Amino acid sequence: MTDYPQAIVPVNHVEPVPRRIRAVLDGRVVIDTTAARYVWEWPYYPQYYIPFADFAPDVLVDEGHEEHLRRGTAMRFGLRRGDGVLAGVAHHYVVSEVEGISGTVRVDWGALDAWFEEDEEVFVHPRNPYTRVDALRSDREVVVELEGLVLARSTRAVLVFETGLPTRYYFDRLDVDFTRLVPSDTVTSCPYKGTTSGYWSVDVGERVEPDLVWAYDFPTRQLLPIAGLVAFYNEKVDLTVDGVWLERPTTKFS
C-alpha cells in the first residue's frame, strides 16, 4: 500500500491570511477583511477566523450565551438572514490561550452562501497554503480497466498531482468508452478544483459500480487543463501507465 502524506500542520497553529477574504449572504458581502487568520483546527487544512470589526454591522446577532470551547471562551452569535436568524453559527473569541485569535469570529462555513479569496470563489473549506496541486499533460500511455473491460486509453492524459492524494489521470472524452458509463446525479466540490459538472457510474454487466468517474467542465483557474476531461477513482479501477500496473491506493475514497 502506498502512503500519501498530506500537508500536516500542528493543531491550533495560527497564521495571518495574506489574501483578501470576503463572504456573501443573501446576495450581499457580509465579511470583507484583509486581516483574517488561518487556524488549524485539525492538521490537514485551516479555517478562517475573521476580526469582529470586519463583519457588516447588522449581520451578527448576539445570543447572549458564553461558551467555553477548546480554543478559549467565546460569545455565541447568529447571522441575520432576511427576516430570520441563523442561530449559533458564529463564535466570537473574547479570551483564548491560542495566540492570535482573541477578538476574531469563527463562522460555520456552510452558513454563508459563498466565500472568496480575492476575486476567486473557494469551495468546501479554505485552501491549505501548504498543499500544492499541478496539472500536467503527459504522452505516457494510460489505460483504465475494470474487471477486464477497458474503460479508457490515452497517450494525451492530463496528470493531476495533489498533495495527499494519488496522481489522478484525466482523459479526453474521445478516449473514454462512454457506452459503459451511466450518468449520476452526484455533485461534489473541492477547494482546489471547484465543483464537478458530472459523475458517472460504470456498468460492468451484472451490476453497476456507482460514481467511479467525474469531470469538471469549469474548474478553478489553476486547474484549467482538466476542463471537460474525465477522471476515474484509482482506488476502484485498474490503472496501467506505460504498461506498468499501479497498485490501487488506499485513501478516504477507497
Image (tube, rainbow, N blue to C red):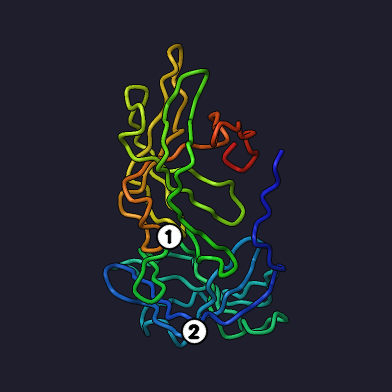
Q: How far across and how far down the image is residue 196, in percent? A: 37, 47
Disc 2, SS: helix
Q: How far across and how far down the image is residue 38, in percent? A: 57, 75
Q: Residue at x 41, y 36 (%)?
A: 154
Name the residue beneath numbered marker 1: 123
Numbered tag placed on residue 206 in the rendering:
none
Q: Residue at x 38, y 77 (%)?
A: 118
Numbered tag placed on residue 52 in the rendering:
2
Instruction: Tell me the quadrant of the picture where the C terminus can be found.
Output: top right
Q: Residue at x 37, y 54 (%)?
A: 225
Q: Are marks 1 and 2 in contact (CB under 8 Å)?
A: no
Tell which of 68 and 190 is nearer to you: 190
Q: Residues within 10 Å of mark 2 (few under 14, many from 20)?
A: some
- Earlier in the chain: of badge 1 and badge 2, it is 2
Q: Residue at x 64, y 69 (%)?
A: 40
**In the rendered image, the vertical position of residue 99 relative to residue 141, given as above or below:** below
Q: For the view shown, which residue lies furthest in the top direction?
A: 206
